[in-house]
Image: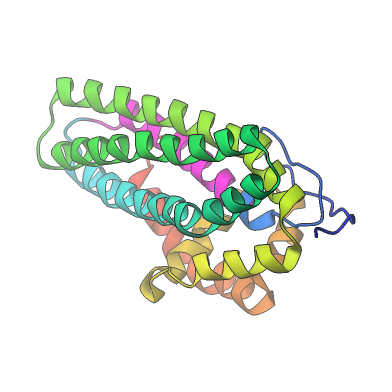
């Protein structure tokens, strides 16, 4: 039985929807904002970084791998924890449209993974040698990835998260979110905390702080941010 109470949802730039309901989906919206932000930066960098700047291409290659790792973990967590619970709920409710939505979520994840790997190879190749044809291929791959991921995120925001609001309780969602979060390697925590806050609108920061908690938010904004921003300048200096 889900609660009839509603929580005011965060709506960030580029976000397609923020379905109302009892669950505060701030962590989902923060991740989606960061994915969109990163792909916009990578798309610009792929076109504007000088071919002979090996150091910047190598920084971009490393930064792409970190982006891809976070995205892969996010999608794996959804596939492993969230969608199976929702599939059981929509089947119990006799909701074939809901099942179709959730099956599409996994199918869309499967379409994105090969693009991430292809782009990784492109960035790595340009880190070794300047090649105009390789740059053109990489720029096309990043643009396609950005388009596919934007479509997937929008679909998830409009339809899959509406199922979350309708079929799960806040307690069930919190347990699932905790399971996903527990899988992040400890060594990636400093990057991920600074990464998720980077470029957020000022009016969204209080919601992010409330979700992360004051200690983690302070670490991200005071301790981890400086190193993160150095890395951003190295990778996206021409973007």
Q: Position of residue 41 (x, y in %)?
A: 44, 37
How many numbered marks are there? 0
Residue found 37% across the figure and 56% down from its top: 231
* Left or right of 193 in this view: 61: left
Which residue is rendered at x = 63% and y = 41% of the image?
A: 160
Residue 175 on image: x %, y %: 62, 70
Left/right of residue 21 with respect to residue 214 in the rendered view: right
Dominant secondary structure, magenta: helix
Residue visible at 35% across and 48% down? 68
Q: Nearer the viewer, residue 2 or 65?
A: 2
Q: How is the image coloured?
A: rainbow
Give residue 193's position: percent from left, percent from top: 52, 65
Does residue 14 appear anywhere in the picture?
no
Residue 218 in sight from this viewpoint:
yes
Q: Is residue 64 above or below residue 40?
A: below
Give the position of the N terminus as an image quadrant.
bottom right
- Decide: is 66 above or below 189: above
Residue at the limit of the structure toward the right, as seen here: 5
Using the rendered view, name the quadrant where residue 156 is placed: top right
**Residue drawn where x is 39% and y is 31% of the image:** 145
**Part of the protein shown in magenta:** 30-50
Whether the magenta-drawn stretch holds residue 139 is answered as no
Q: Quadrant of the C terminus?
A: top left
**Residue farthest left in this picture:** 129
| Viewer-closest of 218 and 237 | 218
The answer to whether 215 is drawn above or below residue 144 in the figure is below
Q: Nearer the viewer, residue 28 or 132?
A: 28
**Viewed as shown, does residue 141 lie left or right of 159?**
left
Horizontal arrangement in the rendering, residue 150 relative to residue 11 (left or right): left
């Amino acid at each position: 039985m889900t609660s009839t109470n509603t929580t005011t949802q965060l709506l960030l730039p580029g976000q397609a929807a923020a379905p109302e309901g009892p669950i505060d989906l701030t962590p989902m919206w923060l991740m989606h904002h960061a994915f969109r932000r990163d792909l916009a930066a990578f798309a610009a960098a792929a076109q504007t970084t000088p071919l002979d700047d090996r150091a910047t291409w190598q920084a971009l290659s490393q930064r792409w791998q970190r982006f891809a790792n976070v995205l892969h973990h996010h999608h794996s967590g959804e596939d492993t924890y969230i969608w199976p619970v929702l599939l059981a709920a929509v089947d119990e409710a006799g909701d074939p449209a809901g099942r179709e939505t959730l099956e599409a979520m996994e199918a869309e994840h499967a379409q994105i993974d090969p693009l991430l790997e292809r782009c990784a190879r492109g960035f790595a190749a340009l880190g070794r040698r300047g090649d105009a044809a390789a740059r053109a291929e990489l720029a096309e791959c990043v643009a396609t990835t950005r388009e596919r991921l934007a479509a997937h995120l929008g679909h998830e925001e409009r339809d899959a998260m509406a199922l979350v609001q309708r079929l799960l309780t806040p307690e069930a969602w919190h347990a699932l979110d905790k399971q996903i979060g527990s899988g992040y390697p400890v060594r990636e925590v400093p990057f991920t905390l600074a990464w998720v806050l980077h470029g957020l609108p000022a009016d969204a920061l209080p919601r992010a702080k409330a979700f992360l908690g004051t200690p983690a938010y302070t670490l991200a904004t005071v301790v981890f941010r400086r190193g993160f921003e150095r890395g951003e300048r190295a990778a996206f200096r021409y973007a």
